[in-house]
Image (spheres, helix red, strand yellow):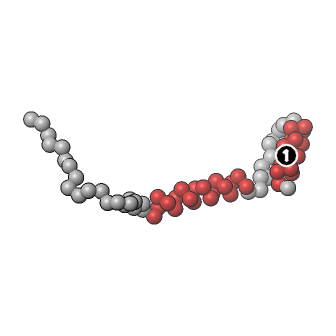
Amino acid sequence: MAARAHTRTNPPASGLDTRLPWWAVVLPALAFAVLLLMITGPGEARAATGDPSVTHLVERIQQTLSH
């Protein structure tokens, strides 16, 4: 026996009729802000070991980008 397909009784409303919960907007915006702060925040982390010339090059790049 075949099952009946359900059809809509009301036509879709014109315009945007979708509503998002508040957290669907706030959470991505909050995540974006946190990631942006992590990228632009002061980077005080230093490598434990490494070539001094590479460290010097990275510092020069940071100084150039900060100005």
Going by the picture, which residue comes out furthest to the bottom?
22
Going by the picture, which residue comes out furthest to the left?
1
Q: Is residue 25 left or right of residue 57?
A: left
| Residue type for callout 1 | Ile
Rendering coords of residue 9 (x, y %): 20, 55
**Residue 59 vertical position relative to residue 49 in the rendered view, above or below:** below
| Front residue of 61 and 7 | 7
Which quarter of the picture shows residue 38?
Answer: bottom right
Residue under the image location 47 percent in, 61 percent down: 23
Residue under the image location 86 percent in, 50 percent down: 64
Residue position for label 1: 61
Quadrant (top left, top right, bottom left, bottom right) of the C terminus? bottom right
Regarding mark 1 in the picture, which secondary structure is present there? helix
Q: Is residue 6 left or right of residue 63?
A: left
Q: What count of labels does the image hold?
A: 1
Rendering coords of residue 10 (x, y %): 23, 58
Residue under the image location 73 percent in, 57 percent down: 41
**Residue 62 vertical position relative to residue 29 in the rendered view, above or below:** above
Rendering coords of residue 1 (x, y %): 9, 35
Task: Give the class, few, some or many, for how many residues have Cα within 10 Å of label 1's Cα (few <14, many ≥20).
Answer: few
Residue under the image location 58 percent in, 56 percent down: 31
Q: Is residue 5 left or right of residue 45?
A: left
Rendering coords of residue 7 (x, y %): 20, 49
Q: Is residue 42 left or right of residue 7?
A: right
Which quarter of the picture shows residue 22?
Answer: bottom left
